[in-house]
Image (spheres, rainbow, N blue to C red):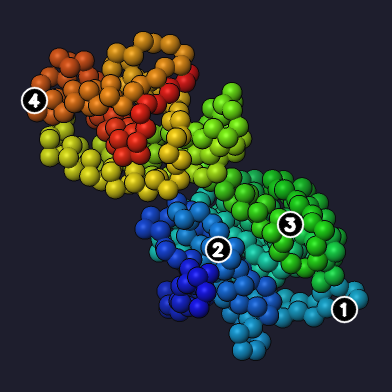
Amino acid sequence: MTSLHNSISSLQQDAAFDLAFRLRQPVPVKPKACVLLLHGVGGSEMNLADLAASMDPDTLVVLPRGPLEFASGQFGWFRVTFSASGPRIVAAEAEQSRQALIRFVGQLQTAYGIAPQNTLIAGFSQGGILSASVALSAPERVAGFAVLSGRILPELEPHLAKKAQLAHLRSFIAHGEYDSKLPVMWAQRSDQWLSNLGVAHAIHLYPIAHEISATMQADFLAWVSAQTPIETSIRLRYRALRSGVPQGTPITVLHIGANQTTIAAGTGEEPAATLQLAIGAEKTAADFFKHHPPTPAELENAIMAVEDEVTRARTLIANDSILVTTDAAIREIALIAGVPDQAELSLSLDVMERTFERLAQVTLGRPASSEGMPASAAFAATLLILREFMHHLQFSSITVKA
């Protein structure tokens, strides 16, 4: 068995779910998002295994199997025949699959604790058709959808949600200009229909037939990455901080938020990698600091948990990368550490370690005011996260920009 197939689970057939499915492995413990990939007619869920394997490791990637079996190993969502006048579908089967998928998406969200705003549905050919059908009829279930060499069924019109309910959706339409199975006019019709519905979308046409090319796959993966709000935010920070840094120089952008810490790393105009860590300032304080100030034991427990999470970033960061942030909370740490206040300042690891030692003294009973430290638990958590990040990822300093 190939390494690609090793990255996909065995078929899951569970009475709690309307459809059989496979998962991209390893399955994230706390998925930040969910992407469903639907195969085309006459194929199987394994057809999109390479696409699944290419996605962000923090994303739950689900490969459902179509409910209809046409032959051994050949599945679909509805029967269809092709004639000179165009495709003719068994509308009742398409409707049954649409309803089953809507239920299935909800079942996944409940089982894995994923919100609709972090859920995308996409598919190839007939799978793309069903992706559009689900999103446009049940927009409360997903944040967006992608149609790869597919179309939007005219038969869907009676089931469309109201225009106002569709306003949050984002869509990706990709099609081959030489597609003889579903001619490119179907993509053009989808483009017009989505415009009329007020659905934000991008349309990409390629000099290919009825297939997924490497360029189409790359464009789709980039679109998926850009849909997560936190992902979009860290990418914008990266682009802004990249300005003025020579091409080829590696930088790592750090943002310690309330509920998660996000990083973006790369050497070009766009980050080569992004990652979300479950160690935000307020979350860490709430999880570990039951006393104010925290006790030495609480501080040590927090250090161990943060260290475990920070080490996930090791493989993403170049050894000579520059660490940069715009976080006001990190600027506050630098100023408390005695760094002169200016638009761009640098906080060294040594100075930051001495500041963390002042926090440790507070946990041992010294008044926070005597150490010049804020009494805020979130401040303590931010300092702890920064210290573990710089120490374990071997950054000698962090540049703080206004």
Which of the two discs, 3 and 2, labels the residue nearer the N terminus? 2
Q: Nearer the viewer, residue 11 or 358?
A: 358
Sequence-wise, the earlier of marks 1 and 2 is: 2
Instruction: Indicate whether 316 appears above or below 11.
Output: above
Residue lying at 53% horizontally and 69% vertically, measured from the top left: 4
Determine if residue 136 is in view.
Answer: no
Of residue 101 and residue 347, the one placed in the foreground of this image is: 347
Label 1 packing within 10 angstroms: few (<14), some (14-19), many (20+): few
Q: Is residue 178 left or right of residue 402?
A: right
User: What residue sits right under mark 4 in the picture?
Assistant: 365
- Residue 52 — which label? 2
- N-terminal label among 4 and 3: 3
Residue type at numbered disc 1 = Ser
Mark 2 residue type:
Ala
The part of the image, by quadrant, that contains residue 138 is: bottom right
Say which of marks 4 and 1 sits in front: 4
Q: Earlier in the sequence, mark 4 or mark 1?
A: 1
